Image (cartoon, rainbow, N blue to C red):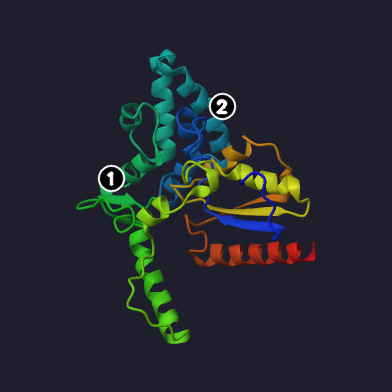
Amino acid sequence: MRGGTTRATSLNGAIVLGPAFGLGEPAWNGDVRAALEFPTLVHTARQHGAAADLSDDDVSNFARTELLPALAAGTQLEDAEREALAARMGELLGLPTPVIIEHDLRISPDAFARLALRKQGRQLGMYDSRYTLAADGAGSDPVADDPAMGAYAPQFTGAIQHYLREELGYASDDEYRAIDFRLAMGGWDWDGHDSPHSNCFGDFTEAVRRDERFELMIGVGEYDLVTTRAATEFTFTRFRFDRSRVHLKVYGSGHMPYLGEAPRVALAADIRGFVRVGAAR
């Protein structure tokens, strides 16, 4: 927030979906990220048929108490320990042990998207890992060539065009762009932050402190391999704030947590409840 400024508009709540909190934090990137995002990969592996035999809580515990210390040990990790850990990771991810070792026990989400269904010739969507496309012939466009974005972005574009023209009576020859990264990443001043990946969560913790009515709802998707649940949860550990007024909601969807009947219904109910309670404060 800009210093020395008091604005007349006062909010007592905010809703953030699929946030990029902490993605640029040095403390997040590296071994910590490789370990804490592991449960997200296991969740996706289950979706595509991997027979993980641990509960979600047990997978998280494995990542924190076994995988993270092993990664921190680096070259000091004994070969036998490395082999055993790689085999266990392979069981949970549905990947061969040699692949895990080849990646030095560090399977990033983008690597997993390429590796998970490689035998079937498929690639996972980064923005929603439930979606897949043929791996052969994949281009480099982060939107059109992503198996998830490429599937649902055209539908959103068609829906908004129909709504604008047919229901609102607004006709324009201007091109509608569902996503324009050049504009989104280059056309903002980020309100004092260095980049869109700067951790703006501190702005929200300031708002929580300044207004004791202010509450924050954050919605994340289990199948989002870009702005992961783990990144948001890690961000919570970097700041001191009243946890009772920050509500993390996790949905069985991707970066757009309203895709799918069950997550859409759950998200709608959570938003209505959050707004209803906020209106009464």
- Label 1: which secondary element: helix
> Which image quarter: residue 85?
top left
The disc, 2 or 1, on the residue closer to the chain's N-terminal end is 2
55 relative to 163 in the view: left or right: right
How many labels were placed on the picture?
2
Residue 105, position as x, y percentages in the image: 39, 28
Frontmost residue, 216 versus 221: 216
Q: Quadrant of the C terminus?
A: bottom right
Pick whichever, 32 or 40, lies toward us: 32
Q: Residue furthest left?
A: 137
Q: Secondary structure at mark 2?
A: helix
CA gap, disc 2 and disc 1: 29 Å
| Apparent side of residue 133 relative to residue 258 in the rendered image (left or right) | left
Residue 64, quarter of the rendered image: top right
Q: Residues within 10 Å of mark 1 (few under 14, many from 20)?
A: some
Q: Residue 178: where, in percent of width, then height?
A: 38, 65
Farthest front residue in view? 4
**Residue beneath the point at 47% across and 17% down:** 73
Q: Are marks 2 and 1 in contact (CB under 8 Å)?
A: no
83 and 138: which is toward the camera: 138
Looking at the rendered structure, the kind of residue marked 2 is Thr
Picture coordinates of residue 45, whole percent (x, y): 42, 46
The crowding category of the residue bearing disc 2, from other C-alpha atoms within 10 Å (few below 14, some 14 to 19, many at least 20), is few
**161 relative to 122 in the view: left or right:** right
* Residue 15 seen in this snapshot: yes
Note whether 206 is above or below 170 in the view shown: above
Q: Which residue is mark 1?
A: 118
Residue sitting at 41 percent across and 70 percent down? 156
Q: Which mark is residue 65?
A: 2
Instruction: Give the camera-side residue of 85 and 127.
Output: 127
